[in-house]
């Protein structure tokens, strides 16, 4: 005797009446595997409500997090890469750029903008990892350099949000030149006494780490971000030794003195506001002009 007996045989629901869950309604955390709806995930600024895993986000989301009412003016939005080396791997470099632009709706791997953050002026350059792994080419270096120039000219603090696999191999030496160019621009920013905050997110590696990402007046990071120059596997094969647990994590880098602090994304806007507020010079009260009449001083109205 069977434990279960079907009263009606066959599938009786017509195909057109079947209801399926639409894509994009649920988010599964890659760390703790907890499942939450995407609305809740976005409410927590793309962090896991269970384990606080910080999911990778791009410039559009960071601008939404930082700028008041998501209002900003983008700088140099139409710069695109040329092909000075006529580079070809599995396909010509111009084709790869065109395909990636169409897929991501981005011009290159960084976007720069200026706007208000809790009422404070701020210039932000933010890298997009989905554009050829956030690789640093000539356009990335040029847009960052121009954003630094804008910050320097207008005396506005500059925030760099890094997320990159390193220099772009399709531009070879041209991409490596961006390390020197951006570093020189940051030196000018320092001379002008304009604050520079570098936010390292997951992952920040290669030539980006070796240049502007580690040159901030304050170097900060999100929890759990991978930060390093070469990858752990390459380092292990080079030195022939096992690496420490958590090697190249933000927490490991902080413990060894290369970061100033780690900030939760949900606290990022307020902590940046507090930091920049402390860095602003205090306005000295204007002293009333006086004129001396005999032995007495009289205020001049």
Image (spheres, rainbow, N blue to C red):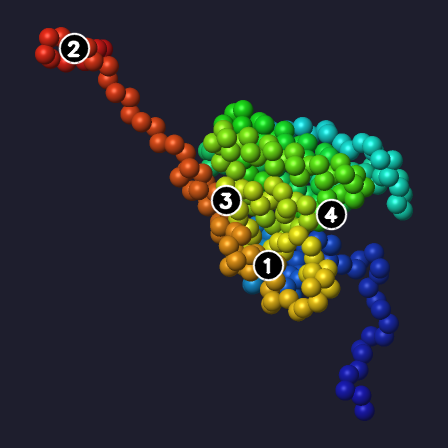
Residue underneath mark 4: 133
Number of the front mark, 4 or 2: 2
Left or right placement of residue 188 versus residue 24 in this view: left
Q: N-terminal of the two: label 3 or label 2?
A: 3
Q: Which mark is residue 249?
A: 1
Residue at screen point 13% across, 8% down: 293
Left or right placement of residue 47 versus residue 194 in this view: right
* Residues packed near mark 1 inside 10 Å, few (<14), some (14 to 19) or many (20 plus): many
Q: N-terminal of the two: label 4 or label 1?
A: 4
Which sits in the foreground, 240 or 211? 240
Residue underneath mark 2: 292
Estimate the spatial distance between the alpha carbons at disc 4 and disc 1, rounded to whole Å: 19 Å
Estimate the spatial distance between the alpha carbons at disc 3 and disc 2, rounded to whole Å: 49 Å
Residue at screen point 14% across, 13% down: 297
Q: Is residue 129 visible?
A: no
Residue underneath mark 3: 218
């Amino acid at each position: 005797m069977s434990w279960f007996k079907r009263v009606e045989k066959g599938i009786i629901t017509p195909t057109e009446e079947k209801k399926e869950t639409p894509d994009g309604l649920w988010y599964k955390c890659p760390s703790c595997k907890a499942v939450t709806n995407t609305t809740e995930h976005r409410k927590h600024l793309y962090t896991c409500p269970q384990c606080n895993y910080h999911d990778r986000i791009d410039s559009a989301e960071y601008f939404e997090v930082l700028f008041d009412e998501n209002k900003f003016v983008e700088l140099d939005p139409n710069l695109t890469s040329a092909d000075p080396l006529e580079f070809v791997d599995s396909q010509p470099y111009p084709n790869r750029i065109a395909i990636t632009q169409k897929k991501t709706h981005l011009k290159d791997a960084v976007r720069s903008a200026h706007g208000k953050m809790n009422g404070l002026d701020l210039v932000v350059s933010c890298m997009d990892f989905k554009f050829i792994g956030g690789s640093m080419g000539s356009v990335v270096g040029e847009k960052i350099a121009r954003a630094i120039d804008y910050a320097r000219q207008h005396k506005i603090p500059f925030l760099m949000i890094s997320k990159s696999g390193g220099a772009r191999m399709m531009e070879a030496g041209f991409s490596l030149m961006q390390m020197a160019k951006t570093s020189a621009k940051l030196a000018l920013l320092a001379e002008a006494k304009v604050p520079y905050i570098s936010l390292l997110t997951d992952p920040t590696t290669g030539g980006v780490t070796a240049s502007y990402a580690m040159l901030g007046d304050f170097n900060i990071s999100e929890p759990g971000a991978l930060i390093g120059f070469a990858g752990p596997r390459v380092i292990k094969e080079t030195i022939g030794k096992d690496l420490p647990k958590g090697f190249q994590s933000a927490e490991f880098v902080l413990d060894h003195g290369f970061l100033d602090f780690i900030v939760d994304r949900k606290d990022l806007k307020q902590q940046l506001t507090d930091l920049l507020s402390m860095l602003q010079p205090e306005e000295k009260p204007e002293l009333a002009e006086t004129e001396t009449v005999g032995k007495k001083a009289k205020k001049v109205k």
